[in-house]
Image: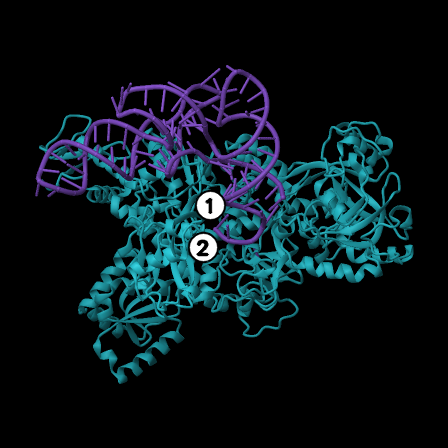
Amino acid sequence: MEYDFRKIEEDCRKKWKDDEVYKVSNPEPGKEFDKPKYYVLDMFPYPSGAGLHVGHPLGYIASDIYSRYKRLKGFNVLHPMGFDSFGLPAEQYAIETGQHPATTTEKNIETFKAQLDKIGFCYDWGREIRTSDPSYYKWTQWIFLQLFKNYFCHTQKKALPISLLVEKYETKGSAHFTAEEWKSFTKKEREDILMKRRLAFSAYGEVNWCEALGTVLANDEVVNGVSERGGHPVVKKKMRQWYLRITEYADRLLEGLETVSFSDAMKEMQRNWIGKSEGAEMIFSLIPSPSPSRHLSGEKGFTETETKMDAENLSQSLGTQSDKENSTDTDLGHPSRPINVMMDEGQGVRVYTTRPDTIFGVDFLVLAPEHELVSKITTDGQKQEIENYLTYVKSRSDRERMAEVKQITGCFTGAYAANPFDGKLIPIWIAEYVLAGYGTGAIMAVPCGDQRDFAFAKHFNIPITNIIGHHYNGQEANATKDAVLQNSGFLNGMLMKDAIAVAINKIEEEGIGKRKVNYRMRDAGFSRQRYWGEPFPIIWSDGIALPLDAEELPLELPFVEKYGPGPEGEGPLANIKEWTLIPSPSPRVEKGVSKNEAEIEAKGAALVPKYKVRSPMQYELAKGMRKEYTEAENLLWQQLRDQKLNVKFRRQHPIECYIADFICLDHALIVEADGGYHESEEQKKYDEERNRILNEVGFTVIRFTNYEILNDTQSVLSKIKEALQISRIRRNNENTKSSEFSHPSPPADEGMGVRETSTMPGYAGSSWYFLRYMDPKNTETFCDRNVSDYWNQVDVYIGGTEHAVGHLLYSRMWAKVLYDLNLIGFDEPFKKLVNQGMIQGSSRFVYRISVLNVGNDKPSPMFVSFNIYKEWLENKLSMRNLLDRIFSVDDVFVTSMNLESAEIMINQIHVDVNIVDGVELNIEAFKKWKNGEFLDAKFILEDGKYICGSETEKMSKSKYNTVNPDDLVNKYGADTFRMYEMFLGPVEQSKPWDTKGIEGVHRFLRKLWRLFYDEHKGAIWTTSAPRNDHYKFPSPLGEVAQRADEGER
RNA sequence: ACCCGGGUGGUGGAACUGGUAGACACGCAGGACUUAAAAUCCUGUUCGCAGUAAUGCGAGUGACGGUUCAAUUCCGUUCCCGGGUACCA
């Protein structure tokens, strides 16, 4: 008998499912579990519309193999799967097609699950989670509230309830105010101060703003300063945003790396991302009226403008800092990063440097264009130039600003500062290579020691001071620390390495500045002006952010008709006034965080939809009708039950004065199965009236004809699923309206609260999902402490390097916060990380010929094989020769005999990799491709074959280089597919996908099968004696499953 | 631009601490079985040159240079490809 993988795999899957072989149980409370635990986790996928491609399963297969191994070794293995189902693509798709993200997401997940199941993974689907499910994001919101209600204590280096801080302020005050002052502050003032300490806080930050689209764009969506869609100009705009104070955890995130087993490359990337550096922050005082001749006489590149500003003017324009909290005292933690203010008493420019030893080599200062001081210090003469420059910079993304270093840009402000040690005059410039977000947003430029400073000085003809003698050759900068300092005042003759400490000490002594540890990492932006994400459980009232109570969670995402941005570029939620406006939230007060609160039971009671029964008669009537059903009704009824929709449908249920065929009360959805008579005009009118009345009482009605139900059951079912999703969201919306919003048009002033209309970013849900798998059904808490103590850290975490910094840092931070709050017992979520390599797509190309001038008007498409194309490209093939070949396959392709004027173009076109075998095009399949667009195509072959060109690119639908695992599994079976993926090479390695070669693996499995299958006895040999009527295979749990061999002999 | 990977036959890859480069597999070629094909089995297969052949000689791990008795491996420079760079997930 042949190796019948279909039957074998089907049998296995069925048995696994029927016996719930992969169901994983948690230990019973108070009992010792007899098996040791092992937690194998995959990075869960974003369910994209393109479905699973062959890159996804690589890591999943590896972890699956490992899970099975561990299970056989006697461990209780947790190996779950779920979906990271919030995100931009679904929303983008919704904007384009009008389909609700909930619907498309649901559909995509179904596809993914079906695909995953075919590959035969041992997941316990009972533990599946979806980040977009309210029962899940309820807890995402809840954790956000913990972040909001706690602050980072610098003495204990951990998160503590903000109530403790309030207590401290009330009794002792702080470095900035006394307890009495605190008490005298208004509520708003106090809240503003507290906001500067919360782990989740709100502040103003810059976003990419596209006026034409009226929306905020991701960096990805901005190309060369214009929007990717439509090419509209994009500028920076300040908007209120939410942030996570991840910078407070920088040191602990660094230390934590020592305790986990990640690859060195991964740790290195995270360290670089955090970018801890030690140096000094110091102040260069401004010189109100410099005499440029002293330092700059006759230099080119400077505008000749004299600074007109006098001292009085200057100090006035610099102003005084009215808001104490804007100062950068450490007690107040990091200043809100994106709006870093670097001023100090209005005296000068605060710069950060890691090389204070080079202080005497400073030839100019450079401010970030966004720097607060820019507008204040610019001299009248430079104003126009600076303004032009700022306009230019506004249109450029951070990445562009860093990437194009060859293109040096900058502008002189006209102002000068003094070197704090020798008083040397230093011009102040602005340039895009200095980023506002890093350090103080201002640098001291040392051209002889820093390449970028050097290039800048050369470009603008700024004289360069050499402080490192022969180490500097005048041609390029030298960043050495081994030089002996010259021209460096009190540092002269010192080795730079040693001078660093000396310089810092001196700087501190003289009060010029202080030692400072700096991080490249910024606080994490946590709000998005988008729809498809977790809504913030926050209400704004009089400028104060008020958290919802835990009992009010989840705050469900309301239904929207349109996904466009709000009036001021807010998220789409801002358009739903009835959702956004909340009457009198004044009684709300923020409660202290306590464990009790965490355990408060969720608001459970299901909201009962509005319906009433007219008379008992109707019930009797309905009962009777239930017995007389049509074929279509019966089929649909069976299907609705079989589909496990997790909702309860009733048949022939009376609503108002009607009896509905099928009804789901929870979702307020009615499904009608109509016979042929519904086609009549009279009946139609009646049906419409009926629909209208049912709609009025809050039900959605969808109708199908009996014919549809019988002949296209699947699409009927999927329409029902879709309707369930939408009606559910709509119903929630209704409830929101009726329960929380009682006035139809509330006065939008005093006492009104406004919901936060931003939503959380994609990484919110994925920052803690590994905890939810442990206890996915818990309605009391995000994860029971006993359960998380048992499963503890993820033992092996498998996923791609693309998440090296983002996701992995965020989830590590969340774990640390939850640990600080004593909600979990470990502060590193992942013990070991394995990075699977990326599977790139391997694209294939065909080459289409067109002849201009003398060609046939409507020729059949013609394609030339790769090597001939290559010869043509390299000018090794004459026009005559090519034309001859063209004639040989199609003698009317070129019409005129006057070939002198012919012009030949050959275009490279992506072709679906699935119709190419290796590099050889399957011509028949190609003709059928794209609905027969190339049905009558002609081909110029080489050696009787059409050879395609190839290139390695990212796997993407538009490049036709995605390979769907389904096809491979159907053709060769899951075992072959899994084995082939593992045979591609080490999991950690990136490699382009190529399907050729899978045959070999399949052949191997067939050989293996033959080795154990006895042709004559028709049985599989087990490790024990051969049996005649059974074949055996060990189940993953160790027992031996037996199955009668029904194999054909 | 910066950070992190990677580059070895026609292909995927192997070579563990510097010690016979190309394991294993795909593909290809030849052969056996077969009326034939498929399947299966056997043999060969880095490239170039010479030889009927066994075999011999030379080159060879992106490129250039260095350290070493010896380099895919260590060092320097450089080119190319992939990932990340904070609103793609």
Image-quadrant location for residue A377: bottom right
Colour of chain B in the rendered structure image: purple
**Numbered mark located on residue A647 in the image:** none
Which chain is disc 2 placed on?
Answer: A
The residue at the point 66 percent across, 44 percent down is A164
Image coordinates of residue A449 in percent, x first then y, are 74, 37
- Dot 1 amino acid type: Tyr
- Residue A122 seen by the camera: yes
Q: Earlier in the sequence, mark 2 or mark 1?
A: 2
Pointers 2 and 1 within a single chain: yes
Image coordinates of residue A1038 in percent, x first then y, are 27, 31
Q: Nearer the viewer, residue A303 or A179?
A: A303
Extreme-bottom residue of the structure:
A682
Image coordinates of residue A1007 in percent, x first then y, are 21, 33
Left or right: A779 as drawn, with respect to A69 = right
**Numbered mark located on residue A769 in the image:** 1
Q: Nearer the viewer, residue A725 or A339?
A: A339
Colour of chain A in the rendered structure image: cyan
Image coordinates of residue A691 in percent, x first then y, are 34, 76
- Dot 2 amino acid type: Ser
Q: Which residue is mark 2?
A: A132
Location of the C terminus of chain A by quadrant is: top left
Q: Secondary structure at mark 1?
A: helix
Location of the N terminus of chain A by quadrant is: top left
Left or right: A498 as drawn, with respect to B48 = right
